[in-house]
């Protein structure tokens, strides 16, 4: 696992959000295993998308790494998950959870501050995060830049479709 941090960029712009999620990093909701119901929803999503084996996935807002762990298993040893979060404490918890996962790269930064190479990802997997982007069109533009041709963005939220489209 590789971890990169930056004190600049959107971490500074979104300091209030980063502080909020730092304070939540040890909360039960952020660290407990997914409930059976949550896992059923995640499995349903995974069955509706192409097989992730060998893919390179961008995961914005990885939090404590719970979804990152699932994605790491899904992409296998030939794949890679590049995950990031603006909360340093969430990233620390993700490091603890993921241990020595050699197909995961963690960044403590915001999407806007990452220097993502064009056409370098097979998909973006945004689990429970898209509603938190301040400027969704900018976020989508950055994601689209990083995606290979014929790739896709998956954005899900327990808050419903309206929270993603707002």
Image (tube, rainbow, N blue to C red):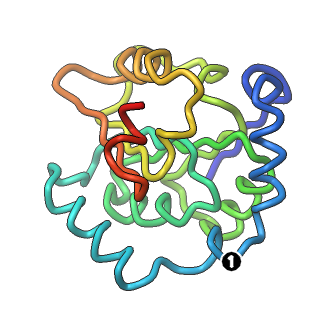
- Residue 104, how many percent across, how many down? 53, 51
- Residue 156, how many percent across, how many down? 35, 49
- Is 74 above or below relative to 40? above
**Which part of the image, by quadrant, shows the C terminus?**
top left
Please, which residue is most extreme toward the bottom here? 36
- Residue 97, how many percent across, how many down? 64, 70
Question: In the shown orientation, is residue 91 left or right of residue 111?
Answer: right
Residue depicted at x 41% and y 58%: 158
- Residue 46, how many percent across, how many down? 23, 60
In this orientation, which residue lies closer to the viewer: 65 or 55?
Answer: 65
Residue depicted at x 80% and y 55%: 89
- Is 50 above or below relative to 15? below
* Residue designated by label 1: 28
Residue depicted at x 29% and y 44%: 55
Mark 1 element type: helix
| Disc 1 packing (10 Å; few <14; some 14–19; many ≥20) | few
- Is 33 above or below relative to 63? below
Residue depicted at x 82% and y 37%: 16
In this orientation, which residue lies closer to the viewer: 118 or 33?
Answer: 33
Question: In the shown orientation, is residue 63 left or right of residue 116?
Answer: right
């Amino acid at each position: 696992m590789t971890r990169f941090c930056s004190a600049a960029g959107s971490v500074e712009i979104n300091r209030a959000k980063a502080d909020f999620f730092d304070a939540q990093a040890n909360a039960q909701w952020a660290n407990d295993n997914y409930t059976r119901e949550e896992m059923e929803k995640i499995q349903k999503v995974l069955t509706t998308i192409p097989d992730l084996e060998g893919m390179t996935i961008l995961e914005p807002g990885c939090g404590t790494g719970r979804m990152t762990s699932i994605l790491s298993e899904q992409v296998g040893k030939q794949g890679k998950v590049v995950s990031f979060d603006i909360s340093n404490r969430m990233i620390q918890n993700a490091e603890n959870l993921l241990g020595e996962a050699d197909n995961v790269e963690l960044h403590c930064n915001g999407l806007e501050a990452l220097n993502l190479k064009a056409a370098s990802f097979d998909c973006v997997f945004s689990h429970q995060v898209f509603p938190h982007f301040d400027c969704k069109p900018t976020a989508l533009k950055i994601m689209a830049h990083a995606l290979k041709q014929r790739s896709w963005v998956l954005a899900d939220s327990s808050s419903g479709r309206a929270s993603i489209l707002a």
